[in-house]
Amino acid sequence: MADYDRRQSGGHNRKRRYRDDDDHYDRRNQRRRHEPAPVPVRFRKQLVSIAESPLRRWADEVLSLAQMVADNYDGDEHLRALYVNLVLQMVTEQPLKTPFVAAVVLVANALKPEAMELVLVRLAGDLERAIADGRWTEVKLLLKFAACLQGNLEGDGVFPLLEELFNRAADLQTASSEDTIGTEIVKIILLTIPYVMVAAPGEFRQKAAELMDKTDIIASEPHALHALVDPYHTKSGEESPTASASVLVLLQKQLQAEAARDWELSCLPRPWQMPLDDAELQEKLKDARKHAIPAISIPANMAAGPRALFPEVYLSVYSEQDDVESVPGTEHIASSLIRDVLVDTVNGLNYNRNATARFLMDIDCYFADGTFVKRATPFDELRSIGGSNRSTWKPEDVAVDTVFSQLFLLPTPECKLVYYHSVLTEACKLAPAAIAPSLGRAIRYLYRNNPRMDLELSYRCVNWFSHHLSNFGFTWKWAEWSDDAGLSDLHPAKWFLNGALDKEIRLSFAQRIQKTLPEAYRHLIGPEKEQDVPVFKYKNPDTPFSVEGQEIGALLRRKATDEEIQPTIDAIQAQAKDRALDPIVTSTDVFVTAMCWVGSKSLSHVLACIDRSKVRLIDAGAASPEARAQIISSVMAYWHAHPGVALSIIEKLLNYSILTPFSVADWAILADSASHKGSPGAALAQPHIYEAIFNTVSKVTARVRQVLSAPAGSEAAADEETRAKEVADMTELFRTINDALESWASGSKDEQIEQGGDGRETDEALIRRWGQRWLRVFKRRAAVEAAFVTEASRDKMVVDGENGSA
């Protein structure tokens, strides 16, 4: 305390004395001076966030940005460059804002016409390069932007370009009915026309009608590959719900209906239309200088681009709501226009799931007033709204529907499946009260339609469902499906439940999942699933070869050499001969089971065991097909309660070349019922068996694509012999799988026919149906990969020709 007093006395506070010396020192609080940000910084910030707030008028934002450009255009070179670059970047990265960015360009043109010339030069260059490279999504986005500028373009604006593109599409379709580049171009043309009509209302009806008459030739009929990508696989005699839901066919019909209504296009925003109090500016917009689009060269040969093109089918998980529409029906042009721009947003922002989810939650900001109901409106209230001739479209349903349309896109989605999982998760976190009910109705739709959906999509649904629940405490209203828990394991509903619960356990642990389930489901999670380490069967003295099994386990634990293990293997084989058993198969079963037990502590432990025993396992597998199958059977039998672990081990065995893809396919599809401990064909109704085959095929196809796509001279490049061998092996694998599945699908499998007795007709029908669903998946995979090989071979021939090779 004395020290404190001493410090406060004596006038030794030098800082205070220094200030006291200045008689003019102002002791009032000094405010920090905020210098205004440079114009380019403010412009970038405002343009990037345009239309995001429902509290700001579109017209005010557009005018503010355009005024900024006009006032500083001549004296700020940085702003000029930023203006052009940012406008084109916004159009391709945030397509929801394209009409608003176009409105800024149009108003800026009314104030400073020179600004639009730079934008058009850059737009023409980007469009030409995108067309030449086959970047068709970018072509569509740039054409949409050009269409929004139609009112300030000379002559017919974008129509000459659209007509030239159609001529290329017609040539491609004439050459081949299975061409997909031509249909993609026609789709782009049809999606561009509505933006032309709202940008220049009443001026180009005749041009639009003439162009649509031409596109009708291509767009009026479903594509030859439509059945390949239909998300539904119905039973024979039953029509698919999406049989006539080709995106191209729907779009053509919708535009024709909209033309009959004088192009209302009520969902599209028109931010270039100023409010009544800005009549002077509106007059300037009307009289603004018009500009010509610089010449754009279109190549004679159109490129397919970096991603394979396939016809699209319109899928909605809210299509069975007969009493009220919570999403636009397929008779509305809004269903195509809103879906298209949201799909481009979701796929274009695949590097930022948080931004994607935010855009999806705010979609009502980017469309005309009255397009959607108020956010988080309960579904039950839509009925009363519908009676007043107002829109009943829920923005949350539209957003969720869009994500599911990409998650269930065939043959492959544009982004990784887990990205779409994460977008739905983030959306739920942003607006749980609004999104959760929409997701609940979507899940019920998918569960009801699971039996008639394509099997690959059913499996994607199981994966997403379990992953999504894992982010929200694994809570779901399981009681709704309690009756299905007692169905036969061959039933598709039981397949869904078994698959979902298995995935949940992989993401958590059995005891926790059991606590989330009603009593009716408890039998689906047996006590063996609660054990992290399965019981080693050879610890039971009553098990044949128990002594030898424990001995091999002990030898593997102390990392014994092959020479030390061999006497025990010889003893097993001798006893197997005495018991009339296959000695190689029997010794392989004992050895692999012991290896799984020793390696059960972690994946690294089992990998170490596999690595030390690689030579012995390769020799065993080479001895006979039965021994190779036994390796898989032993792994699956030991880890039967945790099939995810078994599949991971099988994948490692494939990596070590101990197993081959053919051996996995043979074990899963061709092997007799004893391999799976079930009735013949029952393996087809087990989710993890499908997963094993699907993952194995994916590994093979990825290898083939890597070999064929490797540039000449790179480290991954392979010689012609290797390329041919990889393709031949993949082709043979598909042939083997599909031949086996044909037998199950047609009911001609011997094991299936020989079964008889009461109740077997139903099981036979179910197994036949499973065979048909499997067959469709792998026939499609075979067709897609064959198309890739053909395209890669053609590209290689072109490259070799350019390099002067023979």
Image (cartoon, rainbow, N blue to C red):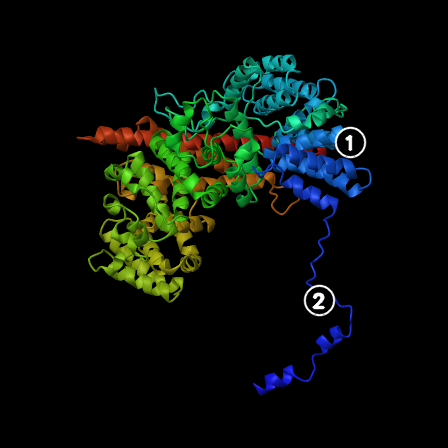
Residue 143 in sight here? no
Please, what secondary structure does the residue beneath circle 2 have? loop
* Residue, disc 1: 112
In the current view of this chain or complex, which residue is farthest to the bottom? 2
* Residue found 30% across the figure and 32% down from its top: 767
Q: In this view, does 462 lie to the left or right of 127?
A: left
| Disc 2 to disc 1, C-alpha distance | 49 Å
Please, what secondary structure does the residue beneath circle 1 have? loop
Asked if disc 2 and disc 1 are in contact, CB closer than 8 Å, the reply is no
Where's the C terminus, which quadrant?
top right
> What kind of residue is marked 1?
Lys
Count of marks, rendered view: 2
Which label is found at residue 27?
2
Q: Earlier in the sequence, mark 2 or mark 1?
A: 2
- Residue 785 image point, x, y percent: 51, 33
- Residue 152 image point, x, y percent: 72, 24
> What kind of residue is marked 2?
Arg
Q: Nearer the viewer, mark 2 or mark 1?
A: 2
Q: Residues within 10 Å of mark 2 (few under 14, many from 20)?
A: few
Can you say whether 439 is above or below 320 in the image?
below
- Residue 236 image point, x, y percent: 34, 22
Name the one closer to the observer, 266 or 428. 266
- Residue 761 image point, x, y percent: 23, 28
* Residue found 53% across the figure and 44% down from its top: 353
Can you say whether 180 is above or below 36 in the image?
above
Where's the N terminus, which quadrant?
bottom right
